[in-house]
Amino acid sequence: MNPLLSRLQPYPFARLRQLFSDVTPNPAYRPVSLGIGEPKHPTPAFIKQALAAAMEVPGSDLAGYPPTAGTPELRAACIGWLERRYGLRLDAETQVLPVNGSREALFAFAQTVIDPNRPAVVVCPNPFYQIYEGAALLAGAEPYYAPSDPARNFAVDWDSVPQATWAKTQLLYVCSPGNPTGAVMPLDEWRKLFALQDRYGFVIASDECYSEIYFRDEPPLGGLEAAARLGRQDFKGLVAFTSLSKRSNVPGMRSGFVAGDAQILKQFLLYRTYHGSAMSPIVQAASVVAWNDEQHVVDNREQYRRKFAEVTPLLERVLDVHLPDASFYLWAGVRGSDTDFARELLAQYNVTVLPGSYLAREAGGFNPGAGRVRMALVADTAECLQAAQRIVQFVQSRRQQAQNP
């Protein structure tokens, strides 16, 4: 067996099941889960219709092997979306590649770009999406966790990374909008990372799967967009990852794409050809339809905006939490043990939240997720409001008990 497998940490949801193994939820309440970031808004009917229709198109059924590089129609749809969304002009033949959702691509990417024959560090935010860590470990690299700073809207403290670490860094994962914090990286932060990249030569993987769920008037800045604004039109050393899962409420389709540096994508395509990562032709056809339509994305974003506008003020009364820049999470401070908070909330009010410490690693003597919980507001507004009301009652009850032991 590959000995590196032993270095993988249990996934947060496996840890959550273990945490709750001896908890009996209060049966007086219907269960509400805010624990898993899985979209619950309905999949648009026209996308489901496109999936069904694709089965009837000659040459698009399941009788042939699909191209790993994707159909010309899908690559054109991805390029068209990048132009409409970010004002970018990329080459459909060399600068875009369909992937089976951003998760598998983020993992596989490390296996492509890491050179195990020399010291290898992978830098990622902390807290973070655990795929970054697993990808680094199985590529034979060492992860380095750069902490987020609550005092700066959870911006990552890249200045805290030692120069000796940057010198060994081969890959940097960034996530904007961030999971779990919802923070969006501004242009100045990208400028800093590009300067570090020019000095030390690492590759940047920009995870942007939450880019279309935002609460301000201006949409989040993307990595390729930042590069273009700063005159880096060749996107050297930069690859952006995006997905239909959150944008279009189709996580079951497993459809996304990567775009950026043509030389890196040429090698990534080679890896994927051997890895057997071609997207189903049925999914490719439906993905074209999804990327070419924007109205359903606007409608989806408006649902989240209304939901967060109703839920956030309730929770602000009792928790350290504020409307994020983007994404569908609330990252809430709970004053004390995040695991105790999650256990007691489930036991007393049958609401599930994810302890923040499960989404981070202890580094530099502290875990930046400790004392926080992540709430995924993915269900409908009524259910999320019900959960919020229960959380308010729970926190108020805890405070009364602490004052009157």
Image (tube, rainbow, N blue to C red):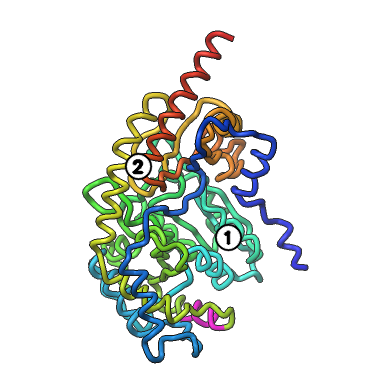
Where disc 1 sits, the SS reads helix
- Left or right of residue 56: residue 34: right
Task: Depth check: give the residue in front, 255 or 352.
Answer: 352
- Span highlighted in magenta in the image: 266-273
Task: Depth check: give the residue in front, 14 or 117.
Answer: 14
Task: Depth check: give the residue in front, 323 or 313.
Answer: 313
Name of the residue lying farthest toward the front: 28
Q: Which-is-in-front pick, marks 1 and 2?
A: 2
Residue at screen point 47% across, 65% down: 252
- Quarter that holds the C terminus: top right
Residue 237 locus on image (x, y percent): 43, 69
For the stretch drawn in magenta, the main secondary structure is: helix
Real-space CA distance between mark 1 and mark 2, rounded to the nearest whole angstrom: 46 Å
Mark 1 or mark 2, earlier in chain: 1
Q: Is residue 212 above or below residue 34?
A: below
Marking on residue 168: 1
Quadrant of the rendered image containing residue 239:
bottom left
